[in-house]
Image (cartoon, rainbow, N blue to C red):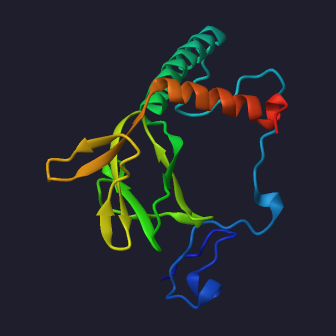
Amino acid sequence: MGQTAPRGTKSADELEGGQGVTVAHVPESRDDIEVQEPVFGSPIETPGYSIPNAADVMKTGIEALNILAGLQEDDKEQAAAHRSIPIVFRWDSGGNEVYICGNFNSWETKIPMTNSHGDFTAIVDLPEGRHEYKFFVDGQWLHDPKEECSDNGLGTFNNVVTVTKRDFDVYFETQELTSPEKGGS
């Protein structure tokens, strides 16, 4: 190998028992590190980067704010389209095990209802629209004849609940009035 390594360079053999490979310059002390002190008021020079002027920064900032404002409006519209409110479902016609299922969950999941003093209840968050549902009571699909019903085309009936924009307005007004930030409890 016959070459001498520059001062501060260590071979891989010296570092961790390597195979005589020379490693790049490793400073032996802090005195070997060159430090440039910044001069107050002088431009910062960074290769490949220029500092924009204040007018460009302001223009870019305003454009960014306008873009964010547009995104926030889009978020509000999406939130309005996807928002839901809690709807209480009640079954008061007996049974030991009662579930609810509907088009709001593609009729795929039976949601267990809680027995409280003989009535079964479940709270399901629903978006605006018309929702059909049915109760699964002790292994049988049943509808509540005391609530709004619709022929399901299969020779039986489904119950129907319609969630309107007004329901959302009332719900969110109530939430606002009862929020701790607004002095509610």
Residue visible at 74% across and 29% down in the picture: 177
| Residue 100 x/y as whole percent | 40, 59
140 relative position to 57: left or right: left
141 relative position to 78: left or right: left
74 relative position to 108: left or right: right
For residue 183, what is the image quadrant?
top right
The residue lying toward the viewer, choosing from 184 and 112, is: 112
The residue lying toward the viewer, choosing from 153 and 65, is: 153
Residue visible at 14% across and 53% down in the picture: 154
Q: Is residue 13 above or below residue 116?
A: below
How many labels, in total? 0
| Residue 126 x/y as whole percent | 45, 43
Residue 21 visible in image: yes
Residue visible at 60% across and 73% down in the picture: 5
State the residue lying farthest toward the top.
55
| Residue 111 x/y as whole percent | 43, 62
Residue 38 visible in image: no
72 relative position to 57: left or right: left
| Residue 88 x/y as whole percent | 53, 48
Which quarter shows the C terminus?
A: top right
The residue lying toward the viewer, choosing from 177 and 31, is: 177
State the residue lying farthest toward the bottom.
17
Residue visible at 43% across and 38% down in the picture: 127
Q: Is residue 4 above or below residue 114?
A: below
The residue lying toward the viewer, choosing from 69 and 11, is: 69
